Amino acid sequence: MSAPPILEMRSITKEFPGVKALSEVSLTVMPAEVHAICGENGAGKSTLMKVLSGVYPHGTYTGEIIFRGEEVQFRDIRASEQAGIAIIHQELALIPELSITENIFLGNEIARGGRIDWAAAKLRAIDLLARVGLAEDPDTQIKHLGVGKQQLVEIAKALAKDVKLLILDEPTAALNEDDSEHLLDLIRGLKGKGITSIIISHKLNEIEEIADEITIIRDGHTIETLDVKAGGVDEDRIIRGMVGRSLESRFPDRTPHIGEVFFEVRDWTIQHPQVPERLVAKGSSFAVRRGEIVGLAGLMGAGRTELAMSVFGRSYGNYVSGTIVKDGREIVLKDVESAINHGLAYVSEDRKQLGLNLLDTIKRSIVAAKLSKIAKRGVIDDSREFGIAEDYRKQLRIKTPSVEAGVSKLSGGNQQKVVLAKWMFTDPDLLILDEPTRGIDVGAKYEIYTIIQSLAAQGKGVILISSELPELLGIADRIYTVFEGQITDDIPASEANPEALMRSMTSAKKKANA
Amino acid sequence: MSTASTPASTPPKKGGLADIRKVFGGGQSSLRQFGILGSLIVIIVIFQIWTDGLTLSPTNLINVVNQYSYILILAIGMVMVIIMGHIDLSVGSVAAFTGIIVAKSMAEWNLPWPLAIVLGLAVGAAIGAWQGFWVAFVGVPAFIVTLAGMLIFRGGNQLIGQSTTTPVPQEFGVIGAGYLPELALPLAFNVLTMLLGVLGAGWIVWNEFRLRRAQKKLGSEMAPVWVSVVKVVVLAGVLLWAAWLFATGRPGTSFPISGIILVVLVIVYSFVTNNTIFGRHIYAVGGNRLAATLSGVKDRRVDFFVMMNMSVLAALAGMIFVARSTASGPQDGNGWELDAIAAVFIGGAAVSGGIGTVIGSIVGGLVMAFLNNGLQLIGAGADVVQIIKGLVLLLAVAVDVWSKRQGGPSIFGIWSNRRKAKLESEAPVEAPAVAPTVASNESSQPSDLPR
């Protein structure tokens, strides 16, 4: 390569009290390339990017950063943005109540003498939206956009700042396949216009598809940098670098023992909580057998989560019609408490917002959904609580020095195990798992799959909602597809393939299993 | 249930200091409270020296209890409100409103005083139900509901009392200005006060014994025996010494009845918040309301009862104050809400909710009380006292915010945090995860390290 690198990070070491998050990490990124950083959760990817973008200011780490030929020492994010580095975080940093235009130019307003020129800003916004391929009115409030579109607004915001280096931290984690594809196309397009991207992702198929070079980080060390163009780099190769050994199978083996139908939802119709005319579930019917893992496939916004939550004690939307039959008897679940008492469990896709109280300890989180089980006349039995938490820690291999530790201190995979433990503790007959492996690294995913399979082996029914088709095909016994609030197909996993699923997920083909 | 084949995980090592910290309840906020306890001791020692021993004299201690018990009672309710992420600005007005009704009921309707107390509590419950209704079931922010309540009940007090003072009968004074009675024994101290002190000390010894037994049974790590002995001796010693001071004051005085009420409430509410389902629900909703409701917690019900409980405690505080000052007046309870809120935040509660303890708030309240009292003893004016109280509140919360940003739970917690981190890195290496082919290589490092 002839051109000098656009970015060199040399011997970056960053310590937190008692933890060495990065040790002597080096990263070299060539101009106008897509450089991927891979590593398991907690390997140090995000920390490295926070060092680069000035979240951790100069002086809190050792080592040097050379950007566009000069050594840089960023004091804060603003300084790195001025140099042309923009970071787009996993958690989007947009203000929901403000419009697209207002968000794009927030902190970077087009103004003269302190007065904002909204007309000019709007024109620029239209131009930027066109560049990222987002067909929306720039006056639309952010809260009315889906996650995928918000992601594009974030990128437009970065482009408005004349960005040279774009850092994307798990950009497609919350996106469905369509939106992901669009985003990757956009990154490719930006590359053509000379913008360098660093992308952090757990979705290795995407990395393989888009990256020019891949740097692998493990336990705070740089392991290697792979040149994708040179060939010989595939998912297995990357995984080997990430976990330090090769991965033979991504899904554990299992022989399903499927019993009778024990849980059925019939003609389930639900209104949107704010917009009553909008039906987020339209006459959906589905059934689950004992010991069966049922997949629920659908694009973002198809209504999978809404369907699941509305069944789980009407925790979403307004109930219109439909019945739930469990063990041959009709049951009415008016609130979450009755859903839990009837043996339902719902593991949310949003672990941090809906799944856990991050201020709590592991022990207290595990028993939180059924305190009555360890209480007598309203008084909690401490030693039983500790014993139960210990049992789950061992059974699910939650990695922690103690069950008295705070859940916020755990990695994503271990947090998810705590959430699973919390719902296993309620003795459910039916577990609804909404994106249970989102944002979790490969090794922990395998463990979560094993837990799911063992639950099914105990005769429980499992509904698995996932945006990753390979995951559904690998784990589920049968897959329902959802499109615009309707169930469009019911396919045994053995007969399903990604193309067929995608077709049913994008069109109201037929009404199955009515 | 038991899978006793692998060794139990060990809770973080608890050394001497950390062990005493445990007395102030577990949870993640305890470090901060431990720091506040240190500040309280420092403040008491400084004023003890500055006032030539006046601060810890029996008369002054009795005075502090009499003067601040009602604020501390408010702090108990307020910490629960604040854990829920709410605030209650109406407590001073509710106290005054209850005070005037109770005073009138005795003065004009000749209600016997025990019935008047029941009436007062009922009034508090009714007001609390009113405010709880708006907060929980209509969804008006507690700040607004109680700001309205502050105006409504202050006005109510002045309307009923015609803006003048209404005296209360002398017997009623016992809850505000009464003391444990003297027994007819030829001893030079108040026997009942000492008896309570001895009972308390006995409880400390028994509790430590029980704790060690439980730890042994669960196989969790135990503090060395000497730590337990030192802890018990220090705590029981302090308690007995305090009891002795209260018991040997001016004849006719001993431990105040209002102090007894306070101690009982602290014990009851600590138990409720730490050991009951309702207490868990308070922390769960305050920490993450959505996650709590998806776990089957009826958040509105919790909102309602916490707001209601606050007003009942405010009514009680109002009655104690009226009893102490022998009359109910139009300016009773002015500014109490602010003292109670300050006590809670100095005691380690988080503005965003989810964090706080009853004991912490009591210690926070005592910091304010001894500061106030000490400054008065050295002759500082009310103006200076207010300025210093304001600065202390600001400083206490600023230190907390600052130290959180530095990555430790508090400056007092930094050293122990280091120790904990070291322990984490020493955590036992576990057998490879489920399948040997994909041994999870996850490090024990937190995914979201503190910024």
Image: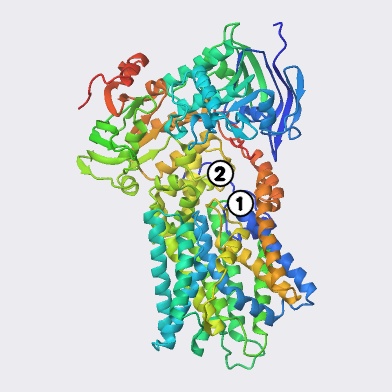
Q: Quadrant of residue B364?
A: bottom right
The nearer-to-camera label among 1 and 2 is: 1
Residue B392 x, y percent position in the rendering? 69, 61
Q: Residues within 10 Å of mark 1 (few under 14, many from 20)?
A: some
Q: Residue shown at 58%/81% (left/top)?
A: B256
Q: Which residue is mark 2?
A: B7
Q: Chain of mark 2?
A: B
Q: Residue shown at 52%/70% (left/top)?
A: B92
Q: Quadrant of residue B379?
A: bottom right
Residue A363 x, y percent position in the rendering? 51, 48
Residue B59 x, y percent position in the rendering? 68, 82
Q: Residues within 10 Å of mark 2 (few under 14, many from 20)?
A: few
* Image: A84 above or below B360: above
Q: Which mark is residue B221?
A: 1
Q: Which mark is residue A67?
A: none
* Image: B140 above or below B235: above
| Residue A376 visible | no
Say which label, 1 or 2, has the lower sequence index: 2
* Image: B176 above or below A155: below
Callout 1 secondary element: loop
Observer-nearest residue: A147 or B166? B166
